[in-house]
Image: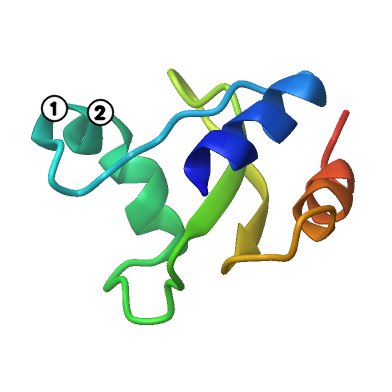
Amino acid sequence: MSFYDQKVAEELGMEFVDVKMQDTATYRKYRKILLTQYPDKAEMGWPTYLVCKNPEGEFEIIGEVKGAHPKGEFRTRLQEFTI
């Protein structure tokens, strides 16, 4: 599923970063963003996509898309955050 989601994000001009908690190096790099939105990870769905500006620096979370979606719905929901 993340392959399709990545493709859609890139078609919309967004960068897609797949952060798996098992990938400790990537998780550590983006952990601050995740914990800002979900301090205890209790309300986080699988998958959860956070839409951010400047994720490598002083980031700003501008939205999120939770859960698996039928083909087409993910694109529609993600388009709400395109700038």
* 7 in relation to 1, above or below: above
Quarter of the figure that contains the C terminus: top right
**Secondary element at tag 2:** helix
Q: Residues within 10 Å of mark 1 (few under 14, many from 20)?
A: few
Examine the rendering and report whether any part of residue 60 can be seen: no
The residue carrying mark 1 is 25
Q: Amino acid at mark 1?
A: Ala
Element under label 1? helix
Q: Do the residues bearing badges 1 and 2 touch, measured as CB atoms within 8 Å?
A: yes
Mark 2 crowd level (few <14, some 14–19, many ≥20, 10 Å Cα): few
| The image quarter in which residue 14 lies | top right
Disc number at residue 29?
Answer: 2
The residue shown at (13%, 27%) is 25
Of the pair 26 and 35, the residue shown nearer to us: 26
- Spatial CA distance of label 1 from label 2 is 6 Å
| Residue 66 placement, left or right of 78 | left
Q: Residue at x 79, y 22 (%)?
A: 11
Q: Position of residue 36 (x, y in %)?
A: 41, 55
Q: Can residue 42 be seen? A: yes
Looking at the rendered image, the disc whose residue lies closer to the viewer, 1 or 2, is 1
Q: Is residue 19 left or right of residue 62?
A: left
Which is more toward the observer, 37 or 58? 37
- Residue found farthest to the bottom: 42
- Tell me what residue is drawn at x 32 percent, y 67 percent: 39
Q: Does residue 71 appear to the left or right of 34 in the view shown? A: right
Location of residue 82 with respect to 57 vertically, above or below:
below
**Which amino acid type is shown beneath numbered disc 2?**
Lys
Q: Position of residue 63 (x, y in %)?
A: 69, 53
**Location of residue 13 by image quarter:** top right
